[in-house]
Image: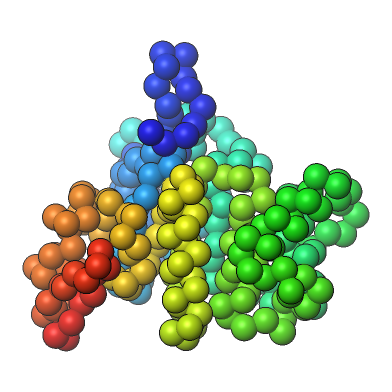
Amino acid sequence: MPRGTSLKNGTTPPLLEFRNITVIKGSAKLLDAVSLTLAEGENVAILGPNGAGKSSLVKTINREYYPVASRRRTVFRIRGKDVWDVFDLRASLGIVSNDLQCTFSRDISVREAVLSGFFASIGLFMHRVTPAMERRTDELLESLGVSHLAGKPMALLSSGEARRVLIARALVHNPKTLLFDEPTNSLDLSALHTFRSTIRAIAKDGTGIIMVTHNLHDIIPEISRVILMNGGRIVADGEKEAILTDAKIGRLFGVPVRVRVEDGWYYATGY
């Protein structure tokens, strides 16, 4: 059962509960009446082509974007709360994204980057680092195989190394779920292999995985639910085997495909 804080009636509130969420920037409708519920600790993939609204959904979760008022009844809750901020979110959801990796491409050290996760900051500035934070950082750097990089500037890391450092940063609060936004962009085969192994180990350890991607091969075998997005809307949601079919994936990406399964991994061929 996913971990979480129980309600008075003994049930666990969803990690995320959206109903009829619409986001507009300028003249563009980025999300169109999106309704979505995700449980804490759930392993789920959100799949769609570029421009489908996936990253806009992530930014809405992270409160970079806000839904517009609607005549329909809207729900915008995190862990059962209607009012929340990113500090409420940190203990439940760690986010690793390409935007964050670009932000950290600077001359702060790997160790400082991970420690800054305790404060949701970019660097430490005047924050007070405790011995417990130091110990947690050392544990994470070691477990993710990047302890030898502790003193190296983030700007000098490879994409794969930086991704592992940001995973360590996301884990400092021991969140119940990690969200990855297009996590394998720019990774070569070796880095992709390491990333997959890392994510599978995290999932097997009981941390939920939300994988936001346009690549079928990012969907690790531990993921059981797949949500399809296109045009700012959710167009399908269900068990992985029922969603990842030739017809549904071909329609989503607008090309004829053959979906094949190998050792629990899904691949699209024939396009």
Residue 256 spot, x, y in % from top left: 11, 80
Quarter residue 17 falls in: top left
Q: Nearer the viewer, residue 253 or 262?
A: 262
Q: Nearer the viewer, residue 142 or 132?
A: 142
Residue 23 spot, x, y in % from top left: 42, 54
User: Which quadrant of the figure contains the C terminus?
Assistant: bottom left
**Position of 93 relative to 5 (above/below):** below
Q: Residue furthest top?
A: 9
Apparent side of residue 256 relative to residue 13 in the rendered image (left or right): left
Question: Which residue is pictured at 77% across the width and 78% down the height?
Answer: 153
Residue 153 visible within the image = yes
What colour scheme does the image use? rainbow
Question: Which residue is pictured at 83% across the width and 59% down the height?
Answer: 124
Quarter residue 35 falls in: top left
**Position of 195 relative to 91 (above/below):** below
User: Which quadrant of the figure contains the N terminus?
Assistant: top left
Q: Count the numbered circles shown.
A: 0
**Position of 138 relative to 16 (above/below):** below
Q: Nearer the viewer, residue 265 or 185?
A: 265
Apparent side of residue 253 relative to residue 28 in the rendered image (left or right): left
Question: Which residue is pictured at 72% across the width and 68% down the height?
Answer: 147
Residue 179 spot, x, y in % from top left: 48, 56
Residue 25 visible within the image = no
Residue 48 spot, x, y in % from top left: 30, 67
Question: Which residue is pictured at 22% across the width and 55% down the height?
Answer: 240
Apparent side of residue 251 relative to residue 169 in the rendered image (left or right): left
